[in-house]
Image (spheres, grey):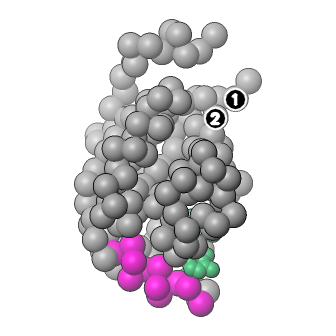
Amino acid sequence: MSERERTFVMVKPDGVNRGLVGEVISRLEDRGLKLVGAKFMQIDEDLAHEHYGEHEGKPFFEGLVDFITSDPVVAMVWEGQDATRQVRKMMGETDPAESAPGTIRGDYGLDLGRNVIHGSDHEDPGANEREISLFFDDDELVDWEREDETWLYE
Ligand code: IDP
Ligand code: MG
């Protein structure tokens, strides 16, 4: 059985401007994931470079940094069984045009550069922990038990 773990999720500036923050949170909550940290913030240039460091040098990198720093985001940490992989499944593919209806990107996006949500890559070991610590101090994360947790897990 998969471990309960924490993953980093962010509603990007397009999602914030389009009023999709509540929708994203609702979907993750309804699935049974537990919110343990959240921050409404604007990302500065340095943080953008660190967060997207793996893409530095790629043709879309500067545009990506401009976009992600352009307006506020909602940075969050969600906890649950196999959380990183499950959130990625709920997000869809990187390109909304290739994302199945029913996924967040498949329901709310059309363009690769405006794909509403970020989630840690489950295929990149340690990406979740690395991204969480980039955006949150330990004392900004809350250990708590959801009232329905005993009904979510066997
Ligand atoms: P992911 O967000 O699904 O993990 P990554 O490959 O890590 O996808 O790329 C990070 C972000 O960079 C994407 O979510 C998207 O916003 C942007 N991006 C990736 N590839 C392209 C591209 O070819 N053109 C424009 N933007 C891109
Ligand atoms: Mg990625």
- Determine contact: label 2, label 1, CB under 8 Å: yes
Disc 1 packing (10 Å; few <14; some 14–19; many ≥20): few
Disc 1 residue: CB within 8 Å of ligand 1: no
Q: Residue at x 29, y 40 (%)?
A: 139
Name which quarter of the figure residue 97 lies in. Answer: bottom right
Residue 51 vs residue 102, the one in the foreground: 102
- Where does residue 125 sit, x and y in percent of width and height? 67, 52
Name which quarter of the figure residue 105 lies in. Answer: bottom right
The magenta stretch is 59-69
Q: Is residue 97 magenta?
A: no
Q: Identify residue for label 1.
A: 2
| Left or right: 2, with 153 as reference point | right
The answer to whether residue 135 of the structure is visible from this angle is: no
How many tags in the picture?
Answer: 2
Image: 76 above or below 96 = above
At label 2, the amino acid type is Asp
| Circle 2 SS class | loop
User: Which residue is most to the right?
Assistant: 1
| Left or right: 151, with 75 as reference point | right
Q: Identify residue for label 2.
A: 82
At label 1, the amino acid type is Ser
